[in-house]
Amino acid sequence: MSQPADERGAARRVLDVDVEGTWGDFQLQAALQVTGGVTLLVGPSGAGKSTLLQVVAGTRGGAVGRITFDGRPWLTNDAMVPAWQRRAPLVHQVPMLWPHQRVGAQLRYGGDWQLDRIASLMQIDGLLERWPASLSGGEARRVAIARALASKPSVLLLDEPLTGLEPRLAAQVAELILDAQRALELVVLWATHAPDRIAGDHRVALMQEGRVHGVGTRQALLAAGTTRAGAQTLGLPNRFHAVVVERALDARTVQVSVGDASLQVASPSWDAPVGSWHYLLVSPDALVLAAGAEPTQLSVRNRLAGRVTSLLACGDAWRIVVDVGGIAWVAEITTAAVDDLKLKVGADVWVCVKARAFRWARAPQRADSPEPTGSRDG
Amino acid sequence: MTDVVLLSLWVALLAVACTLPLALMLGWWLARSRSSLRAPVDLFVHLPLVVPPVVTGFVLLTLFGPRGPLGGLGLGFSTAGAAVAAGVVAFPLLVRPIRQAFESQPAGFRAAAMSLGARPWRVFWTVELPLARRGIAAGAFMAFGRALGEFGATITFVGSIAGETETLPLALHVALAQPGGEAAAWAFAAASVALAIFALIAHHALMRGHR
């Protein structure tokens, strides 16, 4: 797998982390290497993402081990370089803007590196005279990120910076962060539980129960036979083992079986003969749910009958787990849709999905699959 | 009468002003420290609140009195001594709101400032102290009010010397002991209550605005 193009400018800036520590009954034992570009730190809540980020930032003591950045030690067994010398600001969902300073003054607090450019990248030029209390949630996030950027951070640490934002706004802020990363050649370590909402094939570090389980691009980790739990961690709960049953004459679609269900799916970029096994991935928000009689008047090619087994709140949306012939499909829909369909556990629903909504991943045992740098989990 | 009120205000002001830096340091430390010394220090700071003021005055007299080990400071039977007595007694009321003001600041405020390259001293001056200013002012008014009313420690430590150490409560006490002093006593009492109400209102207004 090729390295992301934006890595060249920051090639020498490497963050090397190998730490462990115990806080209460939580144990962290994490090793990972972060180079230029964006690295996503992915894992369920409680996996230790926030703790690891605080240890890297230098705002949480009690860890032992070694952290180096660009060859300089940040943490050794007998010394801890304080946070103000590391300059690795951590931005999380609470923007932590000081209420007694105007936006402009806060932006300059850590320095004024590329300040005009950062202000325009984050689209906060017009907010400099405002007090933090008068900002909207999205504005406050952008100011917090800009404040961190203007200090010329060695590493920018993001801890779920989009949580709680309305989905469209979250996507916009994510894009602004990625733009800033490219424009300023930053090293970014970004913890998230929903990596499918961040565009681009970034490096991913999988985290579970205080350990880092593997580092690679998302595609590489998936293709390398990451287990179902790992796929869920990657924000892709719908990952199915599928066998090709029939190929259409025009070769644009294939008929596959997932459990008992038969699906029409757009063909993969590689040759998929009848009888070959593959992984099929589909994003939870690509699934449409319908209640009542079978919705035949739809452009969607696949309609699967199922039954709701659980409803999970997921940020501003709901994740609905639907049992389709013994296999769990996860759909992400809005609260309003949950109400409209009167969804509850045990309800019969139709899962509708377009043939083009699926992504393919090669089966793990194939010789040409790329190697991830870490071990597989599960 | 005016002399007594002015002297009282001066003693209370001195008491608060001189103890404020120490109260800031202690309040910050009590809010932030995870040292095992925190609990005993906290207890010690609160002592003057519950120990009879006469005992506090007696301790001060023993330490700073003319024959005490620190008698050379010349605090005994002076205005400065009255301020020390009032300052010590009012100290817990000064530290408490300051400590609460620091405690109520999210840890992330400080962490954010440090990660932006600010050393602890700069973080204190530019972030923590300005954000605590209401709590500091509230504590100052409360302590000021208490200092105005200080009696037991003052009379034990520095006595009641007109124009030097005779603050409102002491003057009231003296007036009551004199035949026909009731009118003066009433005047002193009224002045005390008025000043106390002012200090309390200021304290509550600042504490309310604090949230």
Image (cartoon, helix red, strand yellow):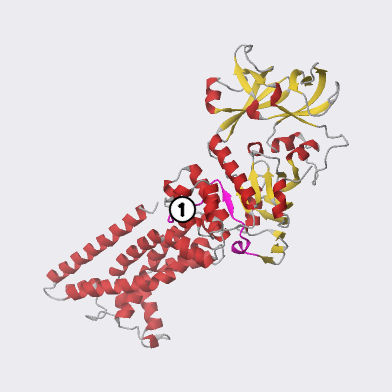
**Residue A91 in magenta stretch:** yes
Q: Which residues are magenta?
A: A81-101
Image check: A366 left or right of A302? right
- Outermost residue on the right side: it is A367
A179 lies above or below B67: above
B76 lies above or below B8: below
Q: Nearer the viewer, residue A377 or A127?
A: A127
Count of all numbered marks drawn on residues in the image: 1
Residue in the picture at 62% in, 45% down: A178
Residue in the picture at 32% in, 63% down: B141
SS of the residue under disc 1: helix
Q: Nearer the viewer, residue A68 or B146?
A: A68
Say whether residue A24 is visible.
no
Q: Quadrant of the C terminus of chain A?
A: top right
Please give the residue where the numbered disc 1 appears in the rendered image: A103
Residue in the picture at 61% in, 45% down: A179
Residue in the picture at 27% in, 79% down: B165
Q: Position of residue B14 (x, y in %)?
A: 32, 74
Q: Nearer the viewer, residue B127 or A250?
A: A250
Q: Amino acid at mark 1?
A: Val
Say whether residue A376 is visible.
yes
Q: Nearer the viewer, residue A78 or B9?
A: A78
Chain of residue at mark 1:
A
The image quadrant that residue A85 belongs to is bottom right
Magenta: main secondary structure: loop
Image check: A269 left or right of A13? right
Q: Quadrant of the N terminus of chain A?
A: top right
The image quadrant that residue A363 belongs to is top right
**Residue B102 in magenta stretch:** no
